[in-house]
Image (tube, rainbow, N blue to C red):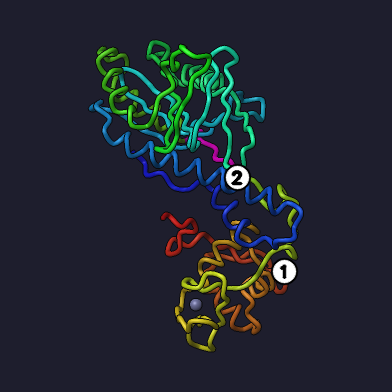
């Protein structure tokens, strides 16, 4: 399985959540969206653990796939995880809710009472996953008509161990495509028993996976524009990797040093560089760079940015440096 990494959208939300000033009118909305997105990612990671028990010998597991539903329309659909085998396919839609969630089999409504005692209403996960199924089926058939015969099974997986699913009205049963994460391995064994016949060749399966990955278009918004945040609404500076909320200063010709704990590190600014790229894009001027990292000397800033840049665009003051995300400091704390 391709290792799941935080989506670019989640990374951008995390950078914005860390950097936006508290008094910004959209601060609480950013916080809310970030928590939802991050919880979703944790749920998907939980599913990945159970998918390691997959019984099929030949299979491909694709995380976070977002595809265009119609070539002429800017309409996309997102699937948390797809499992592809030569005998059947599965679409997983993960839900990482905690506490008691209620599913009403008559109204098809999923609700939850949150920690504040408020009623939260979610879109019907069954309809959601069925829409994905139809759109994905159509797309697969356009890629290769042979896929028409391969069954596509949509599954809704509740990934949080602290989630209790209550089904109403009393006496109704949990819909069979709604399961808890720990039941994923047994569900897959069940499918393996049910669909024994190879319907496409392994070669075709691999080709299809390549095509799907090629068509994958991750959601990548301009996050400042989306939340109406301006450059002056952002907290600048390089923060200590140990104290988190304390700034570090560049010690001339040496390293970054924390003003509080004295922690020194030459590369401590790379986390801030990543956040700057996620917020501003990867074309950065030396002025933006020195302002964001609070480097008072233009020469020092120039030295740092030229060390990192892979190429430049334009000349003199309007010159932009092309930067890429630094792997040494993955932005999302994975704990
Ligand atoms: Zn410190």
Say if 84 sits above or below 40 in the image.
above
For the C terminus, give its image quadrant.
bottom left
For the N terminus, give its image quadrant.
top left
Q: Crowdedness of circle 2 by 10 Å Cα count: few (<14), some, many (20+)?
A: few
Mark 2–mark 1 Cα distance, whole angstroms, equals 26 Å
Of labels 2 and 1, earlier in sequence is 2
Q: Position of residue 155 (x, y in %)?
A: 43, 23
* Residue for point 54% across, 67% down: 309
Q: Position of residue 234 (x, y in %)?
A: 69, 64
Q: Which quarter of the picture shows residue 311?
A: bottom right
Given this view, does label 2 or label 1 mark the residue nearer the observer?
2
Answer with left or right where residue 242 lies relative to residue 83: right
Q: Which quarter of the picture shows residue 208?
A: top left
Q: Is residue 211 visible?
A: no
Indicate which disc residue 220 carries.
Answer: 2
Say if disc 1 is inside 8 Å of ligand 1: no
In the image, which residues are magenta?
214-220
For disc 1, the marked residue is 318
Residues marked 2 and 1 touching at CB (< 8 Å): no
Q: Secondary structure at mark 1?
A: helix
* Residue for point 68% across, 69% down: 288
Q: Position of residue 225 (x, y in %)?
A: 72, 50
Answer with left or right where residue 281 lies relative to residue 188: right
The image shows a total of numbered marks equal to 2
* Residue for point 33% across, 31% down: 182
Q: Secondary structure at mark 2?
A: loop
Q: Position of residue 89 (x, y in %)?
A: 38, 21
Say if 153 sits above or below 225 in the image.
above
Answer with left or right where residue 6 lies relative to residue 198: right
């Amino acid at each position: 399985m391709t290792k799941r990494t935080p989506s670019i959208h989640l990374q951008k939300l995390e950078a914005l959540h860390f950097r936006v000033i508290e008094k910004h009118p959209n601060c609480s909305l950013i916080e809310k969206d970030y928590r939802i997105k991050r919880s979703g990612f944790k749920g998907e990671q939980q599913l990945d653990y159970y998918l390691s028990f997959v019984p099929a010998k030949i299979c491909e597991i694709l995380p976070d796939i977002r595809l265009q539903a119609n070539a002429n329309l800017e309409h996309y659909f997102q699937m948390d995880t797809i499992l592809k085998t030569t005998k059947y396919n599965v679409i997983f839609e993960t839900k990482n809710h905690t506490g008691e969630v209620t599913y009403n089999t008559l109204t098809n409504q999923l609700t939850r009472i949150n920690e504040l005692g408020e009623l939260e209403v979610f879109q019907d996960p069954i309809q959601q996953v069925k829409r994905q199924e139809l759109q994905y089926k159509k797309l697969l058939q356009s890629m290769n008509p042979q896929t028409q015969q391969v069954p596509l099974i949509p599954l809704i997986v509740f990934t949080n161990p602290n989630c209790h699913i209550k089904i109403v009205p009393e006496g109704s049963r949990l819909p069979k495509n709604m399961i808890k994460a720990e039941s994923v391995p047994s569900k897959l064994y069940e499918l393996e028993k049910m669909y024994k016949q190879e319907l496409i060749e392994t070669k075709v399966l691999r080709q299809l996976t390549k095509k799907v990955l090629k068509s994958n278009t991750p959601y990548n918004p301009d996050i400042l524009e989306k939340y109406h945040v301006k450059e002056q609404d952002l907290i600048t500076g390089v923060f200590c990797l140990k104290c988190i909320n304390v700034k570090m200063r560049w010690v001339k010709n040496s390293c970054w040093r924390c003003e509080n704990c004295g922690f020194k590190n030459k590369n401590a600014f790379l986390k801030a560089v990543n956040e700057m790229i996620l917020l501003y894009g990867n074309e950065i001027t030396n002025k933006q760079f020195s302002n964001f990292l609070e480097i008072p000397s233009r020469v020092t800033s120039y030295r740092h940015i030229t060390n990192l840049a892979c190429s430049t665009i334009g000349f003199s003051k309007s010159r932009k440096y092309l930067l890429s995300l630094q792997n040494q400091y993955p932005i999302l704390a994975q704990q």
